[in-house]
Every structure is written in structure tokens, then in C-alpha cells.
Image (cartoon, rainbow, N blue to C red):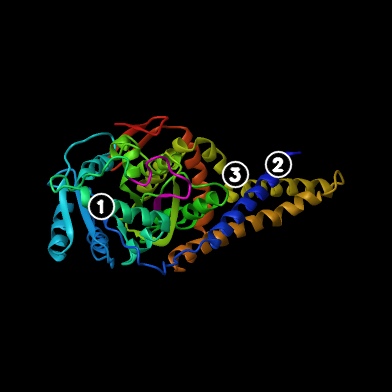
Amino acid sequence: MNLHGILGALALLSLALTLWQWLAARRFSLHQRATDNSFAPAVTLLKPLKGCDEHTESCLRSWLAQDYVGEVQVLFGVAEAGDPACAVVAKLLREFPKRDAQLMVCPERLGANAKVSTLAQLEPLVKHEFIVISDADVSVPPDLLANVVARFPPNQRADHLVRTHSAQETRTQADPCSAPPGNGPTAGGLGEQHVGLVNCFYRLANPTTLAMQWEAIAINADFWSQVLQSASFRKLDFALGAVMALRRQPLANIGGFRALVNCLADDYQLGHRLARQGQRIELCPVVVECWSAPMSWRAVWQHQLRWARTIRVCQPVPYFFSLLNNVTFWSLLWLVTSLAATSFAEYSFAVGEIIVSVEIFWGLPCAALCLLVRMLAALDLQSRLTGARAHWKYWWLVPVKDLLQVALWAGAFLGNRVEWRGERYRLRRDGTLNR
């Protein structure tokens, strides 16, 4: 097979993968709400913070204003008392005086990952079995907690009620946060029917710059649909970090947050280690919002490169073959070779040397069709996640994003340095960081 035929086969393969991704996303019950909210266990919410922007206050308020009948403990954590986020939290604590909420200074740097260091220092203060972890820039609807805990199946709810009743009888006031070892639902081994972690899809809510519109395609169109594509043929073994709900005992079984203090992709590692214990990673259909300060092309590029290198370290083989899913890249290569071959064939035909190949002429409309399907799929997936159509005017950014993704793909294999939260790290092969 010649080069033109190989590129045509790769383009058609990438088209098939794109259609599969599109179908898997459309079959998922996105935005669906739970109909039974009778299960409302006590929940502890952990919010590690560093700095703030114009959206921080509204994002944090959405958590304190949850319409949830169960008890909620909220623990905000900062690395130093002078962090600008402290003033925002203090204002919100005055606004919600009846909430069981407090701000904790967590000055100890336990590892390279400052966020997880904060979580590890908040962990001993957790009162309840169900824990929800969320990033500072995440805004959620009022019924988020109710929908997240509803994803835990009934058999685990019954276990929770029995365990809670037993714990209330044996727990002393001197150690209100203690949990009896081996008393959780994971003691003695877990079957696959147990949900170890529930997480939510998220969308970039305010792509205010052109560079952020590019990133919005990566997040609002591709990321969540690729997760569902993966889930359609194998069980998820990773978590999405915007919102993660899990139970206290399984977390303790993997070593708590201290086991993750040197990991860059702490969300991936948390889900992966729970999955290795035989627990299922569940997806909640409620979509949360990530609000970001305006980002330049350089900032978005650094963010995307960090993300690419993180995925490459976590899943090197799948990430290597992810280039096959880039229908724009293969279609353009096919289109270029078709145009070049067609021009040569027409010239040769004019002088009577060869007959124009039917295969070459078919390459032109097929490659164009692949590009059209890719753009329609990306625009539709964004609309499905966001419920809006304003992004349709940026249709031309879809192929641009795909071509930039090829450079990011190559960059993921050509370096191990990342920049995160203003600090530079070297990424080791095992996914840990070296400052």
C-alpha cells in the first residue's frame, strides 16, 4: 500500500474513533438528576485553597449554600495565614454562621504536591465517613451533594447506617474523629459492586480569551467524551479531580492523602489505587463549573502541556496511541497527499502519460467529510455539556486545536518538566514530582 492509501486508512480509522466517541457521549445521561434523595449521610467537604481571584467567593459560596438535608462539615485549608483566600473564607463564614465550617492553616509541606499536603493535614479533622474533595475554582448547583451521594448503591447505604449506629455507641468524646480499624465496608475485601469513588464531569465556564476558547474545546468537547469512550469498553481506573466523593475507610486503606503527597496527578492516583482494590469509579451526571481568571496563549499552552505530560506518565501506551484519534491531523495529511497526487496525475494525463487514479479523486471528498464530521461532533459535544451554542462561532478553532494537540502530544514525550501553581517540577516516570 502506498503512502496515500496508508494515510487514507488512518484517516478513516480516526473517523471511526471520533464517531464512537460521539456516540458514547450522547448515550450518557448527562445533567440527569437523582429522583430519590432520601439517602443523606453526613458529609465532610475538603477545600484546599491557594490564592484567589474574582470568582473564588462565588465558587466557595455555592458549596456553603448546598440544599442538603444531611449534616455537612466544611474544612477550608490554606498553607499560610497571609493567603488572600483567608479574607474570602472569613467573609463567607460570617455569611453562613450556622454552617459547621472552619478555616485551617496547614503550614507543613509534606511533599511536592502542596494541595495534597493541605488535604493530608485536614484529614485528621474529618468527622464523617463520606468525604467530598473539590478544587477552589469549582462552582456547583445547590443539589450537587444530594446527587453525588445518590450514586452510592443501596447495599453500601445499609452498611453505612449499621456502621454509623455502631460507631455512635463506641466512639468517645475524646476522639470524635476516630474510626475503628477494619470496621468499614472495605474490611475483609470488596467486591466490584462497591462504589469506591464518585466524580463529576466539569466544564470551563468562562472562556473569556481566544486561547481559553481553544482550551474549552479540549475540556468541554473532548475530555469528558473521551472518558466515556474509555468507559464504554473497560472499567474506569482513575478519577476526575474537580469533584470527588469517597468514603473514609477506603481512603485510609490506601494510606490516606499522605500516600499521594508527591504525585502530580493526585486525582488519577486516588482513583487508580481505589480501583486496584476492586472498587468501582462512578460518574455522576451532574456537571460542575470551573471558573478561571483570563489566560493568555502561553498560560494555556503550559496548562495543556502539563496535562499532556501527566497523562503520558500515567498511561503511556494509551496516550501514545491517542494520536490515532486525531481525525483532523490524519485527514489533512490525506487531503494534502490527495491534492498533490491529483495535480500530478492531471498533469501526466494531459501529456498522455498516466490515467488519473479514482482512488486519488475519492480522497478529496472523503478527507473533507472527515474534517466536517470532526467539527460537527466537537461543536455538538460542547453544546451538550454546556447547554449553550455561543461557541459555534469558533468552529474554525476545532482543527486548530487538533493541530496544536499534535505538538502537545510530541511535547509530552520530549520533556519531563512542568510548571504548576507558580513552581517548576521534574516529573518522574512513576508520576511523582521532584521540585
Q: In which quarter of the image is the C terminus?
A: top left
- Mark-to-mark CA distance, 3 and 1: 45 Å
Residue 82 visible in the shown view? yes
The part of the image, by quadrant, that contains residue 145 is bottom left
Q: Do the residues labelled 3 and 2 touch (CB within 8 Å)?
A: no
Residue that carries the numbered disc 2 in the rendered image = 6
Disc number lying in front (3 or 2): 3
Residue 216 placement, left or right of 251? right
Give the spatial CA distance, label 3 vs label 2.
13 Å
| Amino acid type shown at disc 3 | Leu
Q: Give the range drawn in magenta.
A: 184-198
Which mark sits nearer the N-terminus, 3 or 1?
1
- Residue type at mark 1? His
Q: What element carries label 3?
A: helix
Vertical order, 432 against 126 (above or below): above
Amino acid type indicated by mark 2: Ile
- Residue 85 shown in magenta: no
Which residue is found at the position 29% from the left and 51% from the top?
A: 129
Provide the secondary structure element on which disc 2 rests: helix
- Disc number lying in front (3 or 1): 1
| Between 66 and 183, the one nearer to me in the picture | 183
Question: Which residue matches tag 1?
Answer: 128
User: Which residue is denoted by mark 3 in the rendering?
Assistant: 324
